[in-house]
Amino acid sequence: MSALTVDHTTASGHEWDDLVRIWQETDAPEGCKVEIIEGIVTVAPPPSIAHNDIADRVQRRLYPEIPEDWGIYQTLGTAVPSRAGLYIPDLAVAPRDALYAEGDGNYIPAAAAELVVEITSKSNASNDRIKKAAGYAQAGVPLYLLIDGWAPGGPTVTLYGEPKGDVYRVLRAGKFGDAIELPEPFAFTLDTSVFPAK
C-alpha cells in the first residue's frame, strides 16, 4: 500500500474539497482501491481471490433480505469528512435514493449506509480494524461487519453496532465456521463456514 500525505489539520470546507480532488485525480493501476484514511490518500492492490469470494458469498446472502429499493455496492465511496475519510468498503448496503441525494456522484455520506462490510487484506487489516471502524461509528453507520482473515489468533468475524462517538459495541463475534446472526433490518444468520481462509 502506498500513501500520499496531505495536510489534514481539519477536513472541513476547502481542506475536504482538496482531499476529494486529490482522491479523484489519483492515477492508480486498474483494480487498485484508492481511499482517504485520516487525511492520507492510500492506494491498495487488488484484493485476493479469497477476498473476492467472501465478498460474493456475503452479497448473495444479503440480497434476499434487503428491501427492493436498497442496493449492495462493491465500490461505493463512503465519506466521513469529520475524520478526513473517504472509504471504499468491500460492501455497502444503502437505500438506492442515497446514491443520488447529494454530492458529485462519486460517493455518499457514510451515514446513508445501513451496513458496511470490510474484508481485511494483509496490507490494510489495521485500517479496517481501527481507523475505519472509528470512522464508520462516528458517521453513525448502524452495522459494521468486519471479516478478518488476518486476525492474529486466526480468521474472525465481528459484527459491530450501536455506535456512540467513534466507538462501536460488539454485537456478535466468532471465528470462521461460526454462525453470525445479523439483527433487523436484515435478520438472518450468516454461515461463515464457507469462507475460505486467506
Image (tube, rainbow, N blue to C red):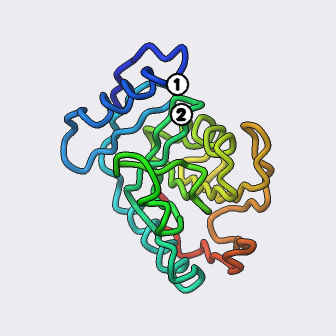
* Mark 1 lies on residue: 12
Q: Is residue 40 left or right of residue 81?
A: left
Amino acid type of disc 1? Ser
* Residue closest to the far front: 102
> In this picture, is 164 found above or below 190?
above
Q: Amino acid at mark 2?
A: Pro
Residue at position x 48%, y 48% from top? Answer: 78
Q: Left of 193 or right of it: where is 159?
A: right
Q: Is residue 165 positioned above or below 41 on the image?
A: below
Quadrant holding the N terminus: top left
Residue at 36% x, 24% y is 18
Q: How many marks?
A: 2
The residue mark sitting in front, 1 or 2, is: 1
Provide residue 120's location: percent of width, then percent of height.
Answer: 50, 49
Label 1 to label 2, Cα distance in Å? 7 Å
For the residue labelled by badge 2, is the local secondary structure a helix, a strand or a loop?
helix
Numbered disc 1: secondary structure = loop
Residue at numbered disc 2: 81
Q: Quadrant of residue 17?
A: top left
Taking the spot 54% from the left edge, 18% from the top edge, the residue there is 10
Query: Residue 105 location, x and y as percent?
Result: 34, 51
Near mark 1 (Cα within 10 A), the count class, few <14, some 14-19 or many ≥20, is: some
Q: Residue furthest bottom?
A: 64
Can you say whether 41 is above or below 76 in the image?
A: above
The tag earlier along the polypeptide, 1 or 2, is 1
Tell me which residue sits at (40%, 17%) in the image: 6
Residue 29: where, in percent of width, then height? 19, 41
Marks 1 & 2, CB-CB < 8 Å contact: yes
